[in-house]
Image (tube, rainbow, N blue to C red):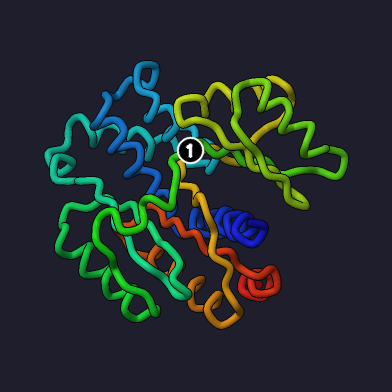
């Protein structure tokens, strides 16, 4: 699982670069719009919106863009055309891939996704083909300093209701039930541990180890999928060799 966890770290680092060119803000804005559209514009009564606003804050999203995203949900006729769609497929080495998209044109989106799969050595699957290999969980990420013990941080989270954790060299991932995510995060903050990220994710229940050639193919495929305008998030159960991740992220 170590190679899978490090891939998630690289994704977070890439998000910082994306933010500089505006791609991340676009995706975060859609998250806010869809959450406000589904549960209303008041974050006090809308847990999904609270989480979307937290992610926007973590990524230093300007307040005016946040406000426009909320306003779009309640006052923009175009937002009624937006739909959340889940796609499933297979990547190199038989890995499972899940894609969350928000689109106003399903035909365009599925064509773009299918094209990336075909060119990347994978194929788009039917609904339900790989979803059983993932569990929906709250995931809290924390970067560890030299004087911070990852297991001590994890114990604080466990006491607050977290279900599991994994510790890497310089980070710790906390896993919760989706409904417990915000409460566990708040407990960590109150204990002096500021998370670097918190989200509801599709976490693989079993990972697939890849050799170098397939790992590079899979990484390119996942990057291409994430770069599509309509794609919000991409999940995979691929477990990448550390050496491949190190060279790929340079």
Q: Which residue is drawn at the image coordinates 57% and 40% (left, top)?
A: 197
Examine the image and state in which quarter residue 121 appears: bottom left
Q: In this view, which residue lies farthest toward the top? A: 44
Figure check: 232 above or below 191: below
Residue 206 in picture, x, y percent from top left? 52, 55
Q: In this view, which residue lies farthest toward the right? A: 147
Q: Which residue is drawn at the image coordinates 34% and 64% (left, top)?
A: 89
Residue 141 in picture, x, y percent from top left? 62, 41
Give the position of the C terminus as an image quadrant.
bottom right
Figure check: 22 above or below 64: below
Q: Is residue 204 left or right of residue 117?
A: right
Give the position of the N terminus as an image quadrant.
bottom right
The residue tagged 1 is: 137
Q: Which residue is drawn at the image coordinates 39% and 24% (left, top)?
A: 47
Residue 241 in picture, x, y percent from top left? 65, 70
Front in this rendered view, residue 128 or 233: 128
Examine the image and state in which quarter residue 75 appears: top left
Q: Is residue 19 left or right of residue 131?
A: right
Under circle 1, the secondary element is strand
Q: Which residue is drawn at the image coordinates 78% and 52% (left, top)?
A: 169
Q: Is residue 212 left or right of residue 167?
A: left
Figure check: 108 above or below 57: below
Front in this rendered view, residue 142 or 17: 142
Front in this rendered view, residue 30 or 140: 140
Residue count near mark 1 (Cα–Cα under 10 Å), binned few <14, some 14–19, many ≥20: many
Residue 183 in picture, x, y percent from top left? 55, 21
| Total numbered labels | 1
């Amino acid at each position: 699982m170590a190679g899978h966890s490090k891939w998630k770290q690289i994704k977070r680092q890439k998000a910082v670069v994306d933010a500089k060119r505006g791609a991340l803000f676009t995706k975060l804005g859609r998250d806010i719009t869809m959450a406000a559209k589904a549960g209303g514009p008041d974050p006090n009564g809308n847990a999904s919106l609270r989480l979307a606003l937290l992610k926007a804050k973590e990524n230093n999203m300007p307040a005016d863009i946040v406000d426009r995203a909320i306003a779009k949900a309640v006052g923009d006729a175009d937002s009624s055309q937006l739909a959340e769609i889940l796609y499933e497929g297979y990547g190199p080495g038989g890995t499972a891939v899940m894609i969350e998209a928000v689109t106003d044109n399903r035909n365009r989106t599925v064509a773009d996704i299918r094209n990336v799969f075909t060119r990347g050595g994978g194929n788009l699957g039917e609904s339900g083909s790989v979803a059983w290999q993932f569990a929906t969980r709250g995931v809290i990420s924390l970067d560890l300093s030299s004087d911070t013990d990852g297991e001590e941080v994890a114990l604080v989270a466990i006491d607050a209701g977290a279900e599991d954790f994994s510790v890497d060299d310089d980070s710790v991932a906390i896993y919760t039930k989706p409904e417990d995510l915000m409460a566990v995060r708040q407990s960590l903050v109150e204990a002096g541990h500021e998370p670097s990220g918190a989200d509801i994710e599709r976490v693989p229940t079993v990972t697939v180890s890849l050799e170098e050639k397939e790992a590079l193919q899979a990484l390119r495929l996942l990057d291409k999928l994430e770069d599509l305008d309509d794609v919000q998030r991409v999940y995979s159960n691929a477990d990448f060799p550390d050496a491949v991740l190190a060279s790929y992220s340079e």
